[in-house]
Image: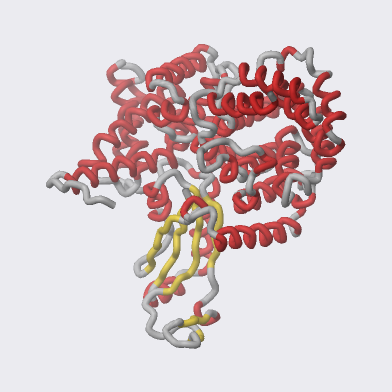
């Protein structure tokens, strides 16, 4: 490493940066519990989130100069509670309530400040409520993603902006609007009623999967993958699996993510170009992730109720993970899983994927029939998937001209710069 | 990134630990492990049995000298480890600081290397990955989910 020019300020600057990173680390770990505790304390999720962010800003301001407190979580929670009381005082409302809470807070200050600032028996339920609120159906998918990563994942606004390649102001707007929408709809800080629970859990899983796929198949920008986003999605899903261990689909989703992420080390070549499953060096697959994914899928299967859509996709991913090569893959097992998936969650994309598996199990001709039957599907009419699969099948059948046309069409429809380059190369190869 | 928390204790810490009721120790460690599991960061971890059951292979001698534990003049013993998947070194430090250990105990925290730390075309790196693969396949074969489809 080249020696950096040293100034008298250098050690101080380093200490400051290290304290700033300590704040961010504590925030990642504790944000959900802090926001949940404050929501319970104030009875107002939007206010709680504001207060938590203000406390975070204070920490970023003060810890670098005044030192990192022994319990960062207790410090942040107390600062936020004091801010709540100040706000209420300014509004000259809830006089009696403020007096009571102020007293409580002062008593807490006298006690050990490193005590856990929440009730351990209630906090898990509160974090789960927080997840349900952040993924509430009144919110747009984008808003759910931003809110979940911010309040449950403890990601800073700047980090969110970096991950989603948008300006900080865009993320701030999304958060403000999301909180307003929740307030307008009068969404309570409660777990959904029993009748809605399964559906609402599905919404939470959908948000987590959306975060994962955005990192895995980036729809915008120049990069093929944003692994940071995938890691956040996996972390949040692990949190949910710990909170809802009795839900097989949570384990199914976790398995799907782990098994998909296992292939990441082999997914790009040394020039940063994508490598297809067929050409991936399977020795580079992450065996630790495969082991964790296998275990999560076993937990989902252990309920004996059959697998849900995520579990079935995980089973497909596991069939790949188990195979030493593409040719040695148990393709009939994958075709079966896709058929099961089509029964419980039919979609043209699933059928298209089954066609790819059929091509491997029974040859391209059988698969082309399935693909051509999808020609009228409106949901596939604008994306690159259908022509790109069609191109592959035609190429395998030796129909080079038609394959080129299909790849060219796919390239035209692709929004990802790198993906487009690969498709154009294939189109050129056939000519 | 992954970090390994390596627990090291000196004789004083080991003696002090023996004074605490075993159930209390298990409960404190259990809570610590649970908090890391609930936060989605715990990847692996194991505790090690008493050093008297272990031995040391010392390469100062040729052939290497095998000595039964607890290793004579050694000042600190390695007692267990955790592997965490976190976003930063500071996050690993935050978790390490929460470990329920007392005076005389230390956690050494080290980043776990991945394939990106080694040249991909090295013959021995490839062989090691092949070996890992076989081992994982054998493990998976023994798991109910391993043959599911």
**Left or right relative to A25: residue B41:** right
List the single residue furthest toward the left.
A8
Q: Position of residue A161 (x, y in %)?
A: 42, 26
Name the residue at 31% across, 27% down: A83
Q: Position of residue A353 (x, y in %)?
A: 75, 30
Vertical order, B79 against A273 (above or below): below
Q: Quadrant of the C terminus of chain A?
A: top right
- The part of the image, by quadrant, that contains residue A347 is top right
Q: Position of residue A234 (x, y in %)?
A: 57, 40
**Left or right relative to A87: residue A34:** right
Name the residue at 49% across, 15% down: A183
Vertical order, B39 against A140 (above or below): below
Total tally of numbered discs in the picture: 0
Name the residue at 30% across, 16% down: A92
Colouring scheme applied when the structure was drawn:
secondary structure
Q: Nearer the viewer, residue A72 or A398?
A: A398
Residue B67 in sight in this render: no
Residue A251 in sight in this render: yes
Vertical order, B140 against B22 (above or below): above
Q: Nearer the viewer, residue A425 or B48?
A: A425
Q: Nearer the viewer, residue A217 or A210?
A: A217
Q: Position of residue A363 (x, y in %)?
A: 85, 35
- The part of the image, by quadrant, that contains residue A277 is top right
Q: Nearer the viewer, residue A306 or B30?
A: A306
- The part of the image, by quadrant, that contains residue A392 is top right
């Amino acid at each position: 490493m080249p020696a950096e020019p040293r100034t008298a300020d250098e050690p101080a600057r380093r200490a400051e940066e290290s304290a700033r990173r300590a704040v961010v680390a504590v925030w990642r770990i504790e944000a959900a519990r802090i926001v949940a505790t404050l929501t319970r304390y104030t009875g107002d999720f939007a206010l709680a989130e504001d207060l938590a962010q203000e406390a975070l800003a204070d920490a970023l301001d003060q810890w670098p100069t005044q030192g990192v407190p022994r319990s960062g979580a207790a410090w942040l929670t107390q600062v936020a509670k004091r801010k709540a009381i100040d706000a209420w005082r300014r509004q000259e409302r809830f006089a009696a309530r403020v007096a009571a809470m102020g007293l409580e807070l002062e008593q807490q200050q006298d006690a050990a400040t490193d005590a856990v600032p929440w009730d351990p028996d209630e906090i898990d339920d509160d974090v789960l409520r927080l997840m349900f609120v952040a993924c509430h159906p009144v919110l747009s998918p984008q808003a759910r993603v931003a809110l979940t990563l911010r309040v449950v994942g403890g990601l800073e606004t700047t980090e969110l902006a970096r991950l989603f390649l948008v300006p900080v102001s865009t993320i701030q707007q999304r958060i403000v609007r999301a909180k307003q929408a929740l307030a307008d709809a009068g969404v309570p800080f409660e777990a959904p009623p029993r009748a809605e629970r399964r559906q609402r859990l599905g919404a939470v899983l959908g948000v987590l999967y959306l975060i994962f796929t955005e990192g895995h198949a980036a729809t915008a920008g120049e990069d093929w993958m944003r692994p940071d986003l995938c890691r956040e999605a996996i972390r949040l899903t692990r949190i949910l699996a710990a909170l809802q261990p009795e839900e097989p689909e949570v384990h199914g989703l976790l398995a799907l993510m782990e098994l998909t992420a296992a292939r990441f080390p082999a997914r790009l070549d040394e020039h940063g170009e994508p490598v297809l499953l067929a050409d991936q060096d399977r020795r580079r697959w992450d065996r630790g992730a495969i082991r964790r994914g296998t275990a999560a899928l076993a937990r989902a299967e252990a309920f004996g109720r059959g697998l849900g859509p995520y579990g079935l996709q995980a089973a497909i991913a596991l069939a790949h993970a188990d195979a030493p090569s593409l040719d040695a893959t148990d393709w009939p097992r994958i075709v079966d899983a896709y058929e099961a998936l089509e029964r419980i969650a039919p979609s043209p994309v699933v059928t298209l994927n089954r066609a790819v598996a059929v091509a491997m199990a029974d040859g391209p001709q059988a698969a082309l029939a399935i693909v051509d039957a999808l020609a009228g599907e409106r949901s596939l009419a604008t994306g690159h998937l259908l022509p790109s699969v069609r191109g592959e099948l035609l190429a395998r059948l030796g129909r080079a001209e038609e394959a080129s046309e299909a790849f060219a069409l796919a390239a035209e429809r692709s929004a990802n710069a790198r993906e487009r380059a690969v498709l154009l190369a294939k189109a050129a190869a056939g000519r | 990134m992954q970090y390994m928390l390596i627990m090291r204790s000196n004789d004083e810490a080991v003696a002090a630990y023996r004074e605490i009721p075993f159930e209390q120790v298990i409960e404190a460690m259990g809570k610590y492990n649970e908090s890391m599991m609930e936060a989605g960061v715990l990847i692996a971890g194991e505790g090690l049995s008493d050093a008297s059951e272990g031995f040391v292979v010392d390469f100062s001698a040729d052939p290497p000298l095998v000595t039964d534990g607890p290793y004579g003049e050694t000042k600190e013993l390695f007692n267990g480890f955790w592997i965490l998947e976190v976003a930063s070194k500071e996050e690993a430090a935050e978790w390490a600081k929460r470990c329920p250990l007392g005076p005389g105990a230390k956690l050494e925290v080290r980043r776990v290397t991945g394939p990106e730390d080694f040249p991909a075309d090295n013959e021995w790196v490839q062989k090691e990955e092949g070996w890992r693969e076989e081992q994982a396949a054998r493990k998976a074969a023994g798991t109910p989910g391993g043959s599911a489809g």
